[in-house]
Amino acid sequence: MSDQDHYGALAEWAQGQPGFAWLERQLQESNRLLNSDVHGDLPAWRAALAELPEAEQRCDGGRSAPRLGFPVADRAALAATLMKLHPWRKGPLQIGGVFIDTEWHSDWKWERLAPHLELSGHRVLDVGCGNGYFGWRMLAAGAECVIGIDPTLVFVMQWLASQHFAGAQTNYVLPVGVEHLPATTACFDSVFSMGVLYHRKHPLEHLQHLARLARPGGQIILETLVLAGEAVEELVPPGRYARMRNVWSIPTVPRLREWLDQAGLPDHQLLDVTPTAPEEQRSTPWMRFESLDRSLDPENPDQTIEGHPAPLRAALRVFCPE
C-alpha cells in the first residue's frame, strides 16, 4: 500500500493563512510517521482503519457525544473494529452509530468551559488533544480550524477513524508534542492546554511557549491540576501522583497565578475549580485499564493512593498581550 497523505486538506488551508508557513514541515513529518512502523502496533492500527466500512458522512459536534457519520448496517462489526484502537480515553463519541463510552466524561469538562468561550472564526491549537474530541466541540462552537497535537499514536489513529465518518471537517490531530512546534509562530487565536501543565518539568517555560504560539491579543485556555488553598505553594510529588508517572508539580491557584505573572501573562481570569470524581474518570469497556477509582485511597477518597490531595482541577482564561 502506498503512503497516504492524511493532511492534504490542512496543507491547502494553511497556504492561505498568514503565519502558517511552518506547518508544512510538521505535516510532512506527521505523514511520514503515520506511514512508518516506528511503533509496533501501527500496522495493526492501519489494518483496523482499512476495515472501516463505507458510510454516509456527517459531523454533529454540538452534542455531548458528537455524532460522526450515520449508523452503519453492521454496528457490532464496526464496534469490534473500533475496539482494536483501545484505549479510548476522551469522549464520549458516537461513530457510525456505535456509542463509545470513553474513560473521561470530557463533555463535563466542556460544559464547564463552554459558557466562557468565544471561538467564532478562531484558528485553534489544542495541545495534548488526545483523539480530537474537543476539536469536534470547538468546531460546533464556531472555530474555523482546530489543529490538535498529541504524540500518542493510537489517539491519532482514533482521530483518523473519526474523520472517516465525519467527512471533510477542519479538525485535525498531528502526532507531535508541543516541544516540536516553533516557539515564535504567534498565529493562533486560541491555544488550549488542558491536562498538560503538570506533566511539564518546567511549567514556566510551557506557559511562555503557549504565549508565543498565540497571536498578539489571542487567548490561552489553561486547565490543570491544582491544590486547594490560598497559600502560594505547590506539591512536587516524590514519586507518582494518583498512580500517574511524570507529574512534576501541582500548584495552588495563587501559585499558578504567580507563574502566569512570571511568564508575562498577568491578565487572566479564573473560570472554574472542580474536583475530579470517579464518575467523571473511570474504567469502561472502551478503556479497560485502571482509572481514578483505583488511584484514590479506599478508606479516604479525599486522598490519592500515595497520600496526596485528591485531584482538583482549575481552568483559566489567559489574555495574551497585544
Image (cartoon, rainbow, N blue to C red):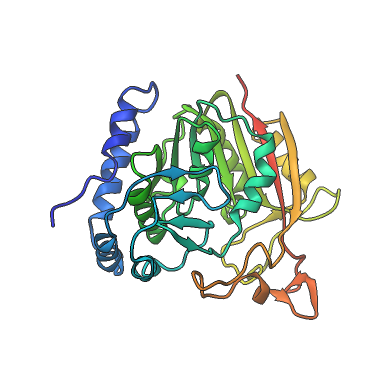
Q: Quadrant of the C terminus?
A: top right
Q: Residue at x 64, y 35 (%)?
A: 263
- For the residue pair 316 and 281, the one nearer the viewer reads as 281
Q: Residue at position x 39%, y 51% from top?
A: 70
Q: Is residue 253 above or below residue 239?
A: above
In the picture, residue 151 is in which quadrant?
bottom left
Does residue 20 sit above or below 7 in this rendering?
A: above
Asked whether, in this view, residue 302 is left or right of residue 319, the answer is right
Residue nearest the viewer, comparing 237 with 102: 102
Q: What residue occupies the far left of the structure in this picture? A: 1
Task: Find residue 184 and report its horizontal and vertical position in percent.
Answer: 46, 30
* Along the line of sight, the residue nearer the viewer: 165 or 121: 165
In this picture, residue 47 sits left or right of residue 300 = left
Residue shown at the point (52%, 31%) measured from the top left: 142
Task: Name the spot of residue 68 as percent of width and height, x first.
Answer: 42, 50
Quarter of the image with the N terminus is bottom left
Relative to 34, does residue 40 appear above or below in the rendering? below
Q: Residue at x 54, y 57 (%)?
A: 92
Asked whether residue 305 is in view, the answer is no
Whole-percent x and y of residue 275? 75, 58
Q: Is residue 84 left or right of residue 3?
A: right
The percent coordinates of residue 97 (x first, y second) are 43, 58
